[in-house]
Image: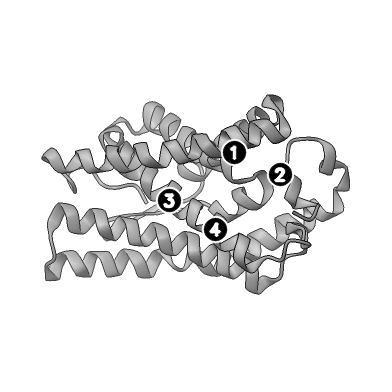
Amino acid sequence: MHIEPGLVTGAKVITGYATAATAAVYALKLGWETLREKGALSLVLRSVIATVAVFSFFQIFPHYPVGVSEVHLILGSTLFLILGAAPAAFGLALGLLIQGLLFAPLDLPQYGMNVTTLLVPLFALQALASRIIAPHTPYVDLTYRQALALSTAYQGGVVAWVAFWAVLGQGIGAESLTAIATFGSAYMLVVLLEPLVDLAVLAGAKSLRGLAGSGIVTHRLHHAA
């Protein structure tokens, strides 16, 4: 979902930094809450795990340029369910930054837009999870329908933000809309795979009850809210 260099130029780039700053403030709020609940070591460990995972998603996993951006298997809902919202947010931001610094410096001017595209859908996913998952249900007991809803919310949010940046940069025209539709159609195919990955990872976590008190997974993974 990298915003391609040149898609948004001039003063419009500032919009990305403004939205990213807003998302960062909320991520820090979540981080402070997690710090108070589980301590610094747990937050740091989970954030490091998320960062390594996100770097792998962007740099090692297959990714293809389609339309106005690239299609990646980000697994945002998986990160959220296993590690929690704050570590997932930190991992998405840091993993993307490291990938850009080491391998894709041309993407760094678009970093604010890319971070916004990753984080805001994560926060929307968190809000949705609180509505569709009963308080007494640990994440390891999610149904396919719930996993699909979370994945659709996250990936749909990513597509919506990419569309926003494309329209901001190129305006509304036939060529722009066609490129957005091509990207959106390709990207939403990830929705078919991500819930299966979620359930497979959750099934593995369910069999590893020893992780419940380790601090390297979110408390909600094995416990009620």
Screen quadrant of the C terminus? bottom right
Residue 126 lies left or right of residue 66; in this view the side is: right
Of mark 2 and mark 1, the one earlier in the sequence is 1
Instruction: Estimate the spatial distance between the alpha carbons at disc 3 and disc 4, rounded to whole Å.
Output: 11 Å
Residue 91 lies left or right of residue 96; in this view the side is: right
Of mark 3 and mark 1, the one earlier in the sequence is 1
Kind of residue sitting beneath label 1: Pro
Point out the frontmost of discs 2 and 4: 4
Quick check: 23 above or below 189? above
Find residue 87 and name its label: 1
Residue 84, by quadrant, is: top right
According to the picture, the residue beneath numbered tag 2 turns out to be 218
Q: Residues within 10 Å of mark 3 (few under 14, many from 20)?
A: many
Of mark 2 and mark 3, the one earlier in the sequence is 3
Check the image and tell me how it is coloured: one colour
**Residue displayed at 55% across by 35% down:** 51
Residue closest to the eye, 7 or 26: 26
State the image coordinates of residue 105 (x, y, percent, origin top left).
Answer: 31, 30
**Residue displayed at 21% across by 38% down:** 14
Of mark 2 and mark 4, the one earlier in the sequence is 4
Q: Furthest-bottom residue in view?
A: 145
Badge 1 element:
helix
**Circles 2, 1 touching at the beta carbon (< 8 Å):** yes
